[in-house]
Image (cartoon, rainbow, N blue to C red):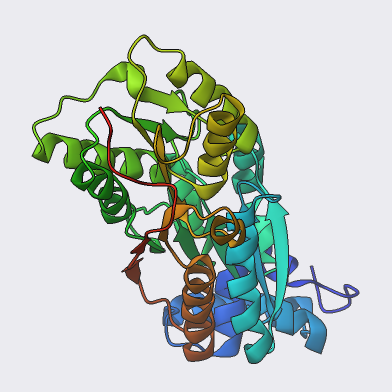
Amino acid sequence: MGTNDQNPRIEDVARAAGVSVATVSRALRGLDNVATSTREKVQAAADELGYRAHPAAAKLAAGSSHTIGVAVANIAGWYCAQVVGGVEAVLAESGYEVLVVGVAGAEARRRFIADIDRMHHRVDGLVLVDIRLEHDEVERLRESELRVVTIGNSYPGLSSVRPDDISAARLAVDHLLALGHRRIALIEGMRDDPMRTEVSWRRREGYTQSLTRYGIVVDPDLLEGGDFSVIGAQEATHRLLDLIEPPTAIFAISDEMAMGARGVAVERGLNVPEDLSIVGIDDHPLAQTVALTTVRQDPPASGATAARWIVEDLQNDQCVLSTQELETELVVRSTTGLAKR
Protein backbone atom coordinates (compact mmCIF):
# COMPACT_ATOMS: atom_id res chain seq x y z
CA MET A 1 0.00 0.00 0.00
CA GLY A 2 1.21 3.53 -0.69
CA THR A 3 0.27 7.14 -0.84
CA ASN A 4 -0.96 6.85 -4.42
CA ASP A 5 -3.99 4.74 -3.32
CA GLN A 6 -7.07 6.79 -4.13
CA ASN A 7 -9.53 7.91 -1.47
CA PRO A 8 -8.38 5.76 1.47
CA ARG A 9 -11.05 5.48 4.17
CA ILE A 10 -10.81 5.41 7.94
CA GLU A 11 -11.63 1.68 7.77
CA ASP A 12 -8.47 1.22 5.65
CA VAL A 13 -6.39 2.96 8.31
CA ALA A 14 -7.95 0.81 11.05
CA ARG A 15 -7.21 -2.36 9.06
CA ALA A 16 -3.62 -1.34 8.38
CA ALA A 17 -2.99 -0.40 12.01
CA GLY A 18 -4.82 -3.43 13.40
CA VAL A 19 -7.16 -1.38 15.60
CA SER A 20 -10.81 -0.37 15.61
CA VAL A 21 -12.28 2.54 13.68
CA ALA A 22 -13.11 4.23 16.98
CA THR A 23 -9.46 3.98 18.07
CA VAL A 24 -8.32 5.53 14.78
CA SER A 25 -10.78 8.36 15.32
CA ARG A 26 -9.55 9.03 18.85
CA ALA A 27 -5.89 8.76 17.89
CA LEU A 28 -6.16 11.17 14.96
CA ARG A 29 -8.10 13.65 17.08
CA GLY A 30 -5.30 13.61 19.67
CA LEU A 31 -7.45 12.41 22.57
CA ASP A 32 -5.53 11.40 25.66
CA ASN A 33 -7.17 7.97 26.14
CA VAL A 34 -5.01 6.35 23.43
CA ALA A 35 -1.63 4.78 24.19
CA THR A 36 1.34 6.58 22.64
CA SER A 37 2.42 3.45 20.77
CA THR A 38 -1.08 3.01 19.34
CA ARG A 39 -1.28 6.67 18.32
CA GLU A 40 2.05 6.40 16.50
CA LYS A 41 0.96 3.19 14.74
CA VAL A 42 -2.29 4.81 13.61
CA GLN A 43 -0.55 7.96 12.41
CA ALA A 44 2.02 5.90 10.49
CA ALA A 45 -0.73 3.92 8.78
CA ALA A 46 -2.62 7.11 7.92
CA ASP A 47 0.53 8.72 6.50
CA GLU A 48 1.40 5.66 4.44
CA LEU A 49 -2.10 5.49 2.99
CA GLY A 50 -2.26 9.23 2.44
CA TYR A 51 -5.42 9.33 4.53
CA ARG A 52 -6.90 12.76 5.07
CA ALA A 53 -10.35 12.89 6.61
CA HIS A 54 -12.99 14.63 4.54
CA PRO A 55 -14.79 17.09 6.84
CA ALA A 56 -18.08 15.19 6.59
CA ALA A 57 -16.37 11.82 7.07
CA ALA A 58 -14.37 13.17 9.97
CA LYS A 59 -17.56 14.38 11.59
CA LEU A 60 -18.99 10.88 11.48
CA ALA A 61 -15.81 9.05 12.38
CA ALA A 62 -15.13 11.34 15.30
CA GLY A 63 -18.43 10.42 16.89
CA SER A 64 -20.06 13.63 15.70
CA SER A 65 -22.83 12.53 13.36
CA HIS A 66 -25.11 14.70 15.50
CA THR A 67 -27.63 11.84 15.46
CA ILE A 68 -28.76 9.72 18.41
CA GLY A 69 -30.36 6.34 17.79
CA VAL A 70 -33.41 5.24 19.76
CA ALA A 71 -34.22 1.51 19.61
CA VAL A 72 -37.71 0.67 20.90
CA ALA A 73 -39.38 -2.66 21.61
CA ASN A 74 -42.87 -1.41 20.69
CA ILE A 75 -42.61 1.33 18.10
CA ALA A 76 -46.41 1.83 17.94
CA GLY A 77 -47.00 1.91 21.70
CA TRP A 78 -47.96 5.04 23.64
CA TYR A 79 -45.19 4.61 26.23
CA CYS A 80 -42.40 4.29 23.66
CA ALA A 81 -43.76 7.26 21.72
CA GLN A 82 -43.67 9.36 24.88
CA VAL A 83 -40.09 8.33 25.62
CA VAL A 84 -39.03 9.19 22.08
CA GLY A 85 -40.73 12.57 22.46
CA GLY A 86 -38.64 13.26 25.56
CA VAL A 87 -35.46 12.31 23.69
CA GLU A 88 -36.38 14.53 20.74
CA ALA A 89 -37.09 17.54 22.95
CA VAL A 90 -33.61 17.51 24.49
CA LEU A 91 -31.80 16.72 21.24
CA ALA A 92 -33.59 19.48 19.34
CA GLU A 93 -32.20 21.99 21.83
CA SER A 94 -28.72 20.50 21.46
CA GLY A 95 -28.65 20.38 17.65
CA TYR A 96 -28.91 16.60 17.36
CA GLU A 97 -31.25 14.51 15.25
CA VAL A 98 -33.04 11.27 16.20
CA LEU A 99 -33.02 7.94 14.39
CA VAL A 100 -35.80 5.63 15.67
CA VAL A 101 -35.46 1.89 15.10
CA GLY A 102 -38.06 -0.76 15.95
CA VAL A 103 -36.61 -3.85 17.65
CA ALA A 104 -39.60 -6.12 18.28
CA GLY A 105 -38.77 -9.61 19.47
CA ALA A 106 -35.65 -11.62 20.25
CA GLU A 107 -34.59 -12.27 16.65
CA ALA A 108 -34.81 -8.59 15.70
CA ARG A 109 -32.81 -7.73 18.80
CA ARG A 110 -30.07 -10.23 17.93
CA ARG A 111 -29.80 -8.84 14.41
CA PHE A 112 -29.68 -5.27 15.71
CA ILE A 113 -26.88 -5.99 18.21
CA ALA A 114 -24.94 -8.06 15.67
CA ASP A 115 -24.99 -5.04 13.34
CA ILE A 116 -24.02 -2.52 16.02
CA ASP A 117 -20.72 -1.61 14.31
CA ARG A 118 -22.59 -0.28 11.29
CA MET A 119 -24.93 1.63 13.62
CA HIS A 120 -21.82 3.21 15.14
CA HIS A 121 -21.16 4.91 11.79
CA ARG A 122 -24.65 6.43 11.79
CA VAL A 123 -25.16 7.60 15.37
CA ASP A 124 -23.14 9.07 18.24
CA GLY A 125 -25.17 7.42 20.97
CA LEU A 126 -27.96 4.94 21.53
CA VAL A 127 -31.04 4.81 23.78
CA LEU A 128 -32.61 1.37 24.27
CA VAL A 129 -36.26 1.48 25.37
CA ASP A 130 -37.66 -1.63 27.09
CA ILE A 131 -35.25 -3.96 25.29
CA ARG A 132 -34.06 -6.96 27.25
CA LEU A 133 -30.45 -7.94 26.47
CA GLU A 134 -28.52 -11.16 26.90
CA HIS A 135 -25.13 -11.05 28.65
CA ASP A 136 -23.13 -11.29 25.43
CA GLU A 137 -25.20 -8.51 23.87
CA VAL A 138 -24.45 -6.23 26.84
CA GLU A 139 -20.76 -6.93 26.33
CA ARG A 140 -21.05 -6.15 22.63
CA LEU A 141 -22.61 -2.78 23.41
CA ARG A 142 -19.97 -1.98 26.01
CA GLU A 143 -17.18 -2.84 23.56
CA SER A 144 -18.77 -0.77 20.77
CA GLU A 145 -17.73 2.49 22.47
CA LEU A 146 -21.12 4.00 21.70
CA ARG A 147 -22.70 6.07 24.46
CA VAL A 148 -25.58 3.78 25.50
CA VAL A 149 -28.42 4.44 27.94
CA THR A 150 -31.13 1.88 28.67
CA ILE A 151 -34.67 2.77 29.71
CA GLY A 152 -36.79 0.20 31.56
CA ASN A 153 -34.00 -2.36 31.98
CA SER A 154 -30.61 -2.03 33.67
CA TYR A 155 -27.28 -3.78 33.10
CA PRO A 156 -23.80 -3.64 34.64
CA GLY A 157 -21.60 -1.19 32.79
CA LEU A 158 -24.45 0.62 30.99
CA SER A 159 -26.24 3.77 32.13
CA SER A 160 -29.93 3.34 32.88
CA VAL A 161 -32.99 5.41 33.76
CA ARG A 162 -36.44 4.10 34.63
CA PRO A 163 -39.42 4.74 36.86
CA ASP A 164 -39.33 3.08 40.26
CA ASP A 165 -41.48 0.17 39.05
CA ILE A 166 -41.54 -1.75 42.33
CA SER A 167 -42.72 1.30 44.28
CA ALA A 168 -45.24 2.14 41.56
CA ALA A 169 -46.82 -1.31 41.86
CA ARG A 170 -46.86 -1.09 45.65
CA LEU A 171 -48.66 2.25 45.45
CA ALA A 172 -51.37 0.67 43.27
CA VAL A 173 -51.81 -2.50 45.32
CA ASP A 174 -51.56 -0.78 48.71
CA HIS A 175 -54.37 1.52 47.59
CA LEU A 176 -56.58 -1.49 46.80
CA LEU A 177 -55.66 -3.21 50.06
CA ALA A 178 -56.56 -0.07 52.03
CA LEU A 179 -59.99 -0.22 50.39
CA GLY A 180 -60.48 -3.72 51.80
CA HIS A 181 -59.70 -5.76 48.69
CA ARG A 182 -58.01 -9.11 49.26
CA ARG A 183 -58.58 -10.95 45.96
CA ILE A 184 -56.54 -8.66 43.77
CA ALA A 185 -55.70 -9.90 40.29
CA LEU A 186 -52.59 -8.91 38.36
CA ILE A 187 -52.58 -8.35 34.61
CA GLU A 188 -48.90 -8.16 33.72
CA GLY A 189 -47.03 -8.27 30.41
CA MET A 190 -46.59 -11.76 29.05
CA ARG A 191 -46.68 -14.70 31.48
CA ASP A 192 -44.09 -16.48 29.31
CA ASP A 193 -42.00 -13.53 28.14
CA PRO A 194 -39.13 -14.49 25.79
CA MET A 195 -37.74 -10.96 26.21
CA ARG A 196 -37.99 -11.24 30.05
CA THR A 197 -39.11 -7.63 30.29
CA GLU A 198 -37.75 -6.10 33.48
CA VAL A 199 -40.65 -3.67 33.78
CA SER A 200 -43.10 -6.57 33.98
CA TRP A 201 -41.32 -8.62 36.59
CA ARG A 202 -40.46 -5.59 38.75
CA ARG A 203 -44.10 -4.56 38.83
CA ARG A 204 -45.06 -8.12 39.71
CA GLU A 205 -42.48 -7.95 42.50
CA GLY A 206 -44.14 -4.81 43.88
CA TYR A 207 -47.53 -6.53 43.71
CA THR A 208 -46.15 -9.54 45.59
CA GLN A 209 -44.48 -7.40 48.24
CA SER A 210 -47.71 -5.54 49.02
CA LEU A 211 -49.75 -8.73 49.35
CA THR A 212 -47.07 -10.38 51.50
CA ARG A 213 -47.03 -7.45 53.93
CA TYR A 214 -50.77 -8.07 54.44
CA GLY A 215 -50.19 -11.77 54.97
CA ILE A 216 -51.84 -12.66 51.65
CA VAL A 217 -50.45 -15.58 49.65
CA VAL A 218 -50.24 -14.88 45.91
CA ASP A 219 -52.88 -16.95 44.07
CA PRO A 220 -51.52 -18.15 40.69
CA ASP A 221 -55.10 -18.14 39.35
CA LEU A 222 -55.12 -14.36 39.74
CA LEU A 223 -52.02 -13.82 37.59
CA GLU A 224 -52.69 -13.19 33.91
CA GLY A 225 -50.66 -11.92 30.98
CA GLY A 226 -52.10 -9.08 28.91
CA ASP A 227 -49.29 -8.58 26.39
CA PHE A 228 -49.27 -4.83 27.15
CA SER A 229 -52.28 -4.41 24.87
CA VAL A 230 -55.98 -3.61 25.20
CA ILE A 231 -56.98 -6.83 23.45
CA GLY A 232 -54.63 -8.94 25.55
CA ALA A 233 -56.04 -7.41 28.72
CA GLN A 234 -59.61 -8.00 27.57
CA GLU A 235 -58.89 -11.69 27.08
CA ALA A 236 -57.16 -11.85 30.46
CA THR A 237 -60.08 -10.13 32.18
CA HIS A 238 -62.59 -12.59 30.74
CA ARG A 239 -60.53 -15.44 32.18
CA LEU A 240 -60.33 -13.76 35.58
CA LEU A 241 -64.06 -13.04 35.76
CA ASP A 242 -64.83 -16.63 34.77
CA LEU A 243 -63.10 -17.96 37.89
CA ILE A 244 -65.29 -19.65 40.50
CA GLU A 245 -64.11 -16.97 42.91
CA PRO A 246 -63.33 -13.95 40.72
CA PRO A 247 -61.24 -11.01 41.93
CA THR A 248 -62.77 -7.94 43.52
CA ALA A 249 -60.02 -5.77 42.06
CA ILE A 250 -57.61 -5.81 39.14
CA PHE A 251 -54.19 -4.20 39.02
CA ALA A 252 -53.02 -3.88 35.40
CA ILE A 253 -49.40 -2.84 34.95
CA SER A 254 -50.27 -0.37 32.17
CA ASP A 255 -53.20 1.99 31.65
CA GLU A 256 -53.95 0.54 28.22
CA MET A 257 -54.46 -2.86 29.81
CA ALA A 258 -56.45 -1.33 32.68
CA MET A 259 -58.78 0.31 30.15
CA GLY A 260 -59.17 -3.02 28.38
CA ALA A 261 -60.15 -4.61 31.69
CA ARG A 262 -62.64 -1.83 32.41
CA GLY A 263 -64.27 -2.31 29.01
CA VAL A 264 -64.84 -6.03 29.68
CA ALA A 265 -66.27 -5.34 33.12
CA VAL A 266 -68.82 -2.90 31.67
CA GLU A 267 -69.60 -5.28 28.81
CA ARG A 268 -70.41 -8.02 31.32
CA GLY A 269 -72.75 -5.79 33.28
CA LEU A 270 -70.47 -5.09 36.24
CA ASN A 271 -70.37 -1.71 37.92
CA VAL A 272 -66.94 -0.14 38.30
CA PRO A 273 -65.92 0.29 41.08
CA GLU A 274 -68.87 -1.16 43.01
CA ASP A 275 -68.41 -4.69 41.65
CA LEU A 276 -64.82 -4.47 40.46
CA SER A 277 -62.06 -1.95 41.19
CA ILE A 278 -59.40 -1.33 38.56
CA VAL A 279 -56.08 0.51 38.74
CA GLY A 280 -53.32 0.95 36.15
CA ILE A 281 -49.91 2.56 35.72
CA ASP A 282 -48.93 5.43 33.39
CA ASP A 283 -51.53 8.21 33.55
CA HIS A 284 -52.19 7.77 29.84
CA PRO A 285 -54.02 10.76 28.27
CA LEU A 286 -57.22 8.67 28.10
CA ALA A 287 -56.99 7.70 31.77
CA GLN A 288 -58.58 10.96 32.90
CA THR A 289 -61.31 10.61 30.25
CA VAL A 290 -62.45 7.28 31.70
CA ALA A 291 -61.70 8.39 35.29
CA LEU A 292 -59.13 5.63 35.73
CA THR A 293 -57.24 5.39 39.01
CA THR A 294 -53.59 5.04 38.08
CA VAL A 295 -50.00 5.52 39.14
CA ARG A 296 -48.55 8.42 37.21
CA GLN A 297 -45.11 8.08 35.69
CA ASP A 298 -43.33 10.44 33.32
CA PRO A 299 -42.06 8.64 30.18
CA PRO A 300 -40.86 11.88 28.49
CA ALA A 301 -38.69 12.55 31.56
CA SER A 302 -37.02 9.15 31.13
CA GLY A 303 -36.26 9.93 27.49
CA ALA A 304 -35.08 13.45 28.27
CA THR A 305 -32.77 12.23 31.03
CA ALA A 306 -31.22 9.57 28.77
CA ALA A 307 -30.68 12.09 25.95
CA ARG A 308 -29.20 14.67 28.29
CA TRP A 309 -26.67 12.17 29.64
CA ILE A 310 -25.56 11.21 26.14
CA VAL A 311 -25.22 14.82 24.97
CA GLU A 312 -23.22 15.75 28.07
CA ASP A 313 -20.90 12.78 27.51
CA LEU A 314 -20.38 13.73 23.87
CA GLN A 315 -19.76 17.39 24.64
CA ASN A 316 -17.27 16.51 27.39
CA ASP A 317 -15.74 13.64 25.37
CA GLN A 318 -16.20 11.18 28.23
CA CYS A 319 -18.44 8.31 29.21
CA VAL A 320 -19.96 8.68 32.68
CA LEU A 321 -21.88 5.71 34.08
CA SER A 322 -25.21 7.00 35.46
CA THR A 323 -28.33 5.38 36.92
CA GLN A 324 -31.57 6.95 38.10
CA GLU A 325 -35.03 5.82 39.20
CA LEU A 326 -37.79 8.38 38.67
CA GLU A 327 -40.53 8.85 41.24
CA THR A 328 -44.17 7.92 40.60
CA GLU A 329 -47.44 9.20 42.08
CA LEU A 330 -50.82 7.60 42.85
CA VAL A 331 -53.72 9.39 41.14
CA VAL A 332 -57.08 8.32 42.60
CA ARG A 333 -60.09 8.66 40.33
CA SER A 334 -63.36 6.76 40.03
CA THR A 335 -62.42 3.19 39.10
CA THR A 336 -61.48 2.16 42.64
CA GLY A 337 -63.74 1.89 45.66
CA LEU A 338 -64.42 -0.08 48.85
CA ALA A 339 -64.56 -3.83 48.59
CA LYS A 340 -68.08 -5.27 49.00
CA ARG A 341 -66.99 -8.85 49.72
Tell which residue pokes out farthest to the top in this image: 244
Residue 51 x/y as whole percent: 77, 80
Residue 54 in sight in this render: no
Image quarter where the N terminus lies is: bottom right
In the picture, measured across the screen, residue 281 lies left or right of residue 88, that is left
In the picture, measured across the screen, residue 93 lies left or right of residue 159, that is right
Query: Residue at the location (43% across, 63% down)?
Result: 297
Residue 96 x/y as whole percent: 68, 82
Q: Camera-side residue: 157 or 62?
A: 157
Query: Residue at the location (65% across, 65% down)?
Result: 69
Q: Is residue 241 above or below residue 71?
A: above
Q: Is residue 97 above or below residue 256?
A: below
Residue 175 x/y as whole percent: 26, 50
Q: Camera-side residue: 44 or 189?
A: 189
Q: Is residue 263 above or below residue 163?
A: above
Query: Residue at the location (53% across, 20% down)?
Result: 238
Quarter occupied by residue 116:
bottom right
Q: Camera-side residue: 21 or 82?
A: 82
